[in-house]
Image: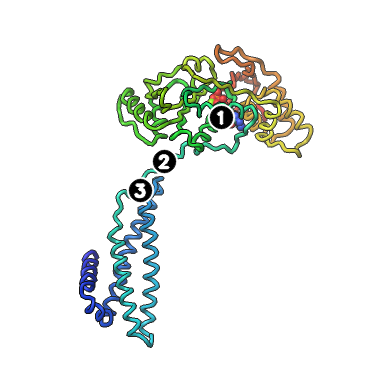
Amino acid sequence: MEDFFLSIASKIAEYAVHPIIHHAQYLCCFKNFASSLPNAKEQLELTRDRVKDRIREAINKVEKVEPAVEKWLKDTEKVLEEVQMLEEKILSVNTSYFRRKCQYSLAKEIERKTIEMIELDRNSKFEPFSRITELPSMKYYSSDNFFMFNSTEESYNKLLEELKNKSVFMIGLVGLGGSGKTTLAKEVGKKAEEMKIFEKVVFATVSQPINIRSIQDQIADQLDFKLKEESDIGRAQRLSERLRKGSTFLILDDVWEKLNFEALGIPLNEISKACCILLTTRSREVCTFMQCQSIIELNLLSDEEAWTLFRHYANISDDSSEGLKGVARKIVNECKGLPIAIVTVGSTLKEKTIANFELALSRLENSKPLDVPKGFTSPYIWKIYFDLEGDLIELGDLERWRMQGERWMKLLTC
Ligand SMILES: Nc1ncnc2c1ncn2[C@@H]1O[C@H](COP(=O)(O)OP(=O)(O)OP(=O)(O)O)[C@@H](O)[C@H]1O
Ligand SMILES: [Mg+2]
């Protein structure tokens, strides 16, 4: 097929050099011109199909096809469509009264289209063909169930203010377990990304026990680069070099103890604010250890805010019975404005009967306060006992309560 193209190309070039002979050729060799068209078309169609296969492969690998490839495909489809119309014209010309005249102009058009097809076929070798797409970053996180309550908004606005403050590069967000720190930090990250306050927004979960490699990998993935070094310190140095370039808003979620930034590879540049850190923690002491320049509290929800959140999760509408709403209000009071309690109890009681609501209320009322570890003081962490099938099940603080979610659901609804 390549030879075929070369011979057509050289023929066409020959014609271009000898225009007079060429004009005669249009008239005499119409059949030759017309017969070259299907071969060129067939070759280009094969190439087009190969390119389409590669595009499909790239899409399956979540890669972005280069704009040059997309343009080529568009041009090719257009030319092939025109060639299709041209072929129809060629067929009809044979029966036309003005055959000779038509053949002259058609031969010229065939020549043009053949050259176009050869050129497109020649230019179908793309390097690169596609590129790996960037991770969606903060857009990945859904805001569908997020409520901007007054208490939430206050902390949200303070956080945004600090992000814009050039001299603040270490911020702490403190609140009780389940008060909504992670949820709020994601929302602030999304806003910062939208406002383009930083070039990149990165969200990494720290938790316990600290796993340096996992934290480094989470950060590197979101910065679209790979840490190839074997040693922890090599990886830390590479990450630090990357973070020094451009500006990054780094959210470190769920911090329980002082972090060693040097071991992680997080640079602190007070002058350029290349890296601004927001850490979320249950402990104010952690913020002090980490020398946070600004510590922002996340308060619990007011009664009305708690009621709104509970109604959403328990699916209570204005049409729900007054009796059920009355019990629900009391349940919400027992949740003490703590989102995790409201969400857990609310979703557990979704579509349940008033008897289930009453059972849940009595269990919440009978729960007892728990001695809380130093640094995590909260009057709202309960020790809750449930009696199920004769077994005494002890659920500790809300964190464990959350982990026992399914069991909790069964308990409330049995
Ligand atoms: N503003 C809000 N709107 C809707 N739901 C919320 C809001 N804040 C918190 N929640 C819900 O409350 C629950 C607990 O929130 P989150 O995990 O953010 O708490 P946390 O303070 O990070 O807890 P922990 O200290 O255990 O990490 C989640 O299910 C979350 O969806
Ligand atoms: Mg959290």
Drawn side of residue 285 relative to residue 217, left or right: right
Q: Position of residue 269 (x, y in %)?
A: 40, 23
- Asked if labels 1 and 2 touch by Cβ distance under 8 angstroms, the answer is no
Q: Residues within 10 Å of mark 2 (few under 14, many from 20)?
A: few
Dividing the picture into quadrants, the one containing residue 71 is: bottom left
In terms of depth relative to the viewer, which is nearer, 312 or 150?
Answer: 150
Ligand 2 lies under 8 Å from the Cβ of mark 2: no
| Residue at 53% across, 31% down | 188
Q: For numbered disc 3, what is the local secondary structure?
A: strand
Amino acid type, label 3: Ser
Q: Residues within 10 Å of mark 1 (few under 14, many from 20)?
A: many
Dividing the picture into quadrants, the one containing residue 210 is: top left
Please tell me in which quarter of the rendered image ligand 1 is found.
top right
In terms of depth relative to the viewer, which is nearer, 299 or 402?
Answer: 299
Q: Earlier in the sequence, mark 1 or mark 3?
A: 3
Q: Is residue 132 visible?
A: yes
Vertical comparison of 315 with 65: above or below: above
In terms of depth relative to the viewer, which is nearer, 55 or 189?
Answer: 189
Q: Position of residue 83 (x, y in %)?
A: 36, 70
Q: Which residue in the structure is indicated by mark 2?
A: 134
Q: Which residue in the structure is indicated by mark 3?
A: 130
Ligand 1 lies under 8 Å from the Cβ of mark 3: no
Ligand 1 lies under 8 Å from the Cβ of mark 1: yes
Q: For numbered disc 1, what is the local secondary structure?
A: helix
Q: CA distance from mark 2 to mark 1?
A: 24 Å
Q: Which residue in the structure is indicated by mark 1?
A: 184
Q: Quarter holding the C terminus?
A: top right
Amino acid type, label 2: Glu
Q: Position of residue 106 (x, y in %)?
A: 34, 77
Instruction: State the residue lying farthest toward the right.
Output: 322
